[in-house]
Image (spheres, rainbow, N blue to C red):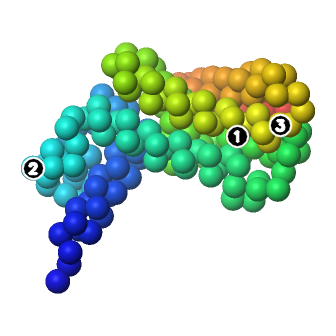
Amino acid sequence: MSDPSQQKERSHARIVRAASRLFRKQGYRGTSVDTLMQGAGLTRGGFYAHFESKSALLRTALGDAFAEARANLFERGLDGLRGDAWLARAAARYLTLAHREQPERGCAIPTLAAEVAREDDETRRAFEREVGSLLAVFVTRLGGDPAEARVRAIRHLAGWVGALSLARAVHDDELAREILDACRSR
């Protein structure tokens, strides 16, 4: 027989993981509690046993989504790279048609930033903490003078996010490819 507290932890993790993916794929406002609970393989009735509100779930799901982004940008074959070598490989990984076409597996910033900007202060602060954490690792990977590296990190991250957002917004695959290629080679 399974321990009820372990079962609750597994259910909680399934809800967070489903929300992380669905919020990035469909948007926060575009994802109902019913849809996300179905995505977790659970019934709607169990939602409030885990979260006081959908926005509380968003704050938790941001942690999961940003952890995946950090793994994509700083691990998975990029572990030992630093400076411009890391930057080129990270840009090549981020600015792809695959990332454009699979938002549920990618960076939360281009998919959720506009929605988070309209949320409560607590949610915006959670998003800010995650962006700050991402930038801190970015700065470390770039190396050099920390103040200059921070400016470079912000410039590159903002450029990548903008390019990916624009590539997702256009219908023409060739134009999307052109946008991503131009920003990757910058």
- Tell me which residue sits at (84%, 32%) in the image: 185
Q: Are marks 1 and 3 in contact (CB under 8 Å)?
A: no
Which residue is disc 1 drawn over? 137
Q: Are marks 1 and 2 in contact (CB under 8 Å)?
A: no
Give the Cα distance between marks 1 and 3: 9 Å
- Tell me which residue sits at (35%, 36%) in the image: 58
- Of label 1 and label 3, which has the lower sequence position? 1
Q: Amino acid at mark 3?
A: Leu
Crowd around label 3: few <14 · some 14–19 · many ≥20 (10 Å):
many
**Left or right for 169, reference 16:** right
Q: Secondary structure at mark 1?
A: helix
Question: Mark on residue 58?
Answer: none
Give the Cα distance between marks 1 and 2: 39 Å
**Left or right for 173, reference 55:** right
Q: Amino acid at mark 2?
A: Gly
Give the Cα distance between marks 3 and 2: 47 Å
Which residue is situated farthest in the bottom direction here? 1
Which residue is disc 2 drawn over? 45
Question: Mark on residue 142?
Answer: 3
Residue 186, placed above or below residue 107: above
Nearer-the-camera pick, 52 or 95? 52
